[in-house]
Image (cartoon, rainbow, N blue to C red):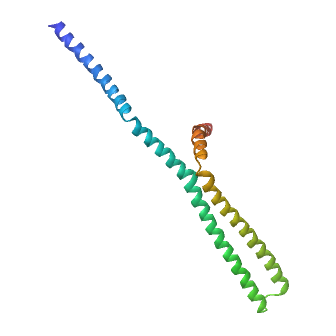
Amino acid sequence: MQTLTESVEEAQQLLGELESTVSGFEFFRMLSEERWSIAFGAIVCIISMYLVTQVLWPFFKLGREIVSLTKKEKELVETRKRAEKQYFTRKIDEKTFNALMINKQEEVLHTRSRLGEKRKERSSLLRTQLSPVSLAKWVSGGPKKALNVARKKKDK
């Protein structure tokens, strides 16, 4: 009777080991059957992350900067017009008017040059970042960047 119970326990133990082995094999079989779907999903995720982080986010950020610089330029031009009006109505003297005009014109020119730079940067962003070469560089440099970030956090 004891040998029979020992045999039953041994059989149950073997059955448990087989079930765990079979479930592992089922997982690998599922991976093997769905490898193309998994690969496609991974590629879509990588391309989506690239587009968001390297194209869309910088593009919209530059767009906001362009809008704020345009508003600043309009405000500076309006300030200059108000100063001209005050000068012609003799509310301010010529010396003050000349100083204001020089100062405001410098600010307007500086703002316009920054605005032009941002517009060029935004158009070049689309040309450079939407090329397959830049995507390949980003993908190949990704693990290195992630390791560097992890190391920096570890050092802190």
Q: How many marks?
A: 0
* Relative to 149, residue 14 above or below: above
Name the outermost residue toward the right.
95
* Relative to 49, residue 8 above or below: above
Residue occupying the point 44% across, 38% down:
39
Hey, which quadrant is residue 143 in on the image?
Answer: top right
Residue occupying the point 63% across, 64% down:
65
Q: Dividing the image into 4 quarters, which one contains the N terminus?
A: top left
Give residue 69's position: percent from left, percent from top: 66, 69
Give residue 26's position: percent from left, percent from top: 32, 28
Give residue 42's position: percent from left, percent from top: 46, 41
Q: Dividing the image into 4 quarters, which one contains the C terminus?
A: top right
Q: Nearer the viewer, residue 153 or 38?
A: 38
Q: In the visual, does 142 lie left or right of 90?
A: left
* Relative to 130, residue 136 above or below: above
Q: Nearer the viewer, residue 153 or 107?
A: 107
Q: In the visual, does 32 lie left or right of 117?
A: left
Name the outermost residue toward the left.
1
Residue occupying the point 36% across, 33% down:
33
Residue occupying the point 43% across, 43% down:
41
Give residue 122's position: percent from left, percent from top: 63, 60
